Amino acid sequence: MPIRVTLDQLIVKRGIKARDLAQQVGLSETQLSLFRSGKVKGIRFRTLAKLCAALECRPKDLLDYDHDPADLAAVDED
């Protein structure tokens, strides 16, 4: 999938522990870990907003996209 989660880089840049971030935004460490690894199919906007507030960032700082023309031709699996 061309969408990549870049949360790890931001966690390192901010010098925060993932455990502390999870607690601050109300996620379990497992949920945060799954998001960090890109193993989730989606994230609620509210959760994304909480992450942005806690890290003082924007959604673009947590996610990146590698252009793939095939995305327009792909059948939606969800």
Image (cartoon, rainbow, N blue to C red):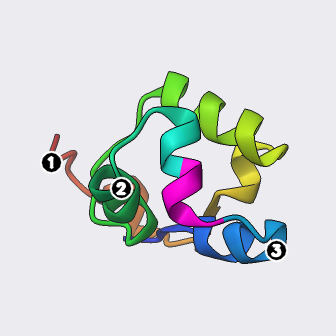
Left or right? Give the position of 76 relative to 52. left
Pick whichever, 77 or 27, lies toward us.
27
In the orientation shown, which residue stands out farthest toward the top?
Answer: 46
Q: Is residue 5 above or below residue 43?
A: below
Q: Can residue 19 be seen by looking at this rendering?
A: yes
Q: Which mark is residue 29?
A: 2
Q: CA distance from mark 2 to mark 1?
A: 27 Å
Placement of the C terminus among the 4 image quadrants: top left
Q: Depth-wise, is mark 2 or mark 1 nearer the camera?
A: 2
Give, as a three-letter code, the residue at label 1. Answer: Glu
Which numbered mark, 2 or 3, is in the foreground of this view?
2
Q: Quadrant of the N terminus?
A: bottom left
Disc with the residue nearer the chain's start (2 vs 1): 2
Residue annotated with mark 3: 13
Residue behind mark 1: 77
Dot 1: within a 10 Å radius of its alpha carbon, few (fewer than 14), some, or many (20 or more) residues?
few
Magenta range is 17-21
Q: Quadrant of residue 36?
A: bottom left
Label 3 sits on a secondary structure element that is helix
Say which label, 1 or 3, has the lower sequence index.
3
Q: Main secondary structure of the magenta part?
A: helix
Label 2 crowd (10 A; few <14 / some 14-19 / many >=20): some
Up/down of 17 relative to 25, above or below: below
Could one spot residue 65 in this view of the protein?
A: no
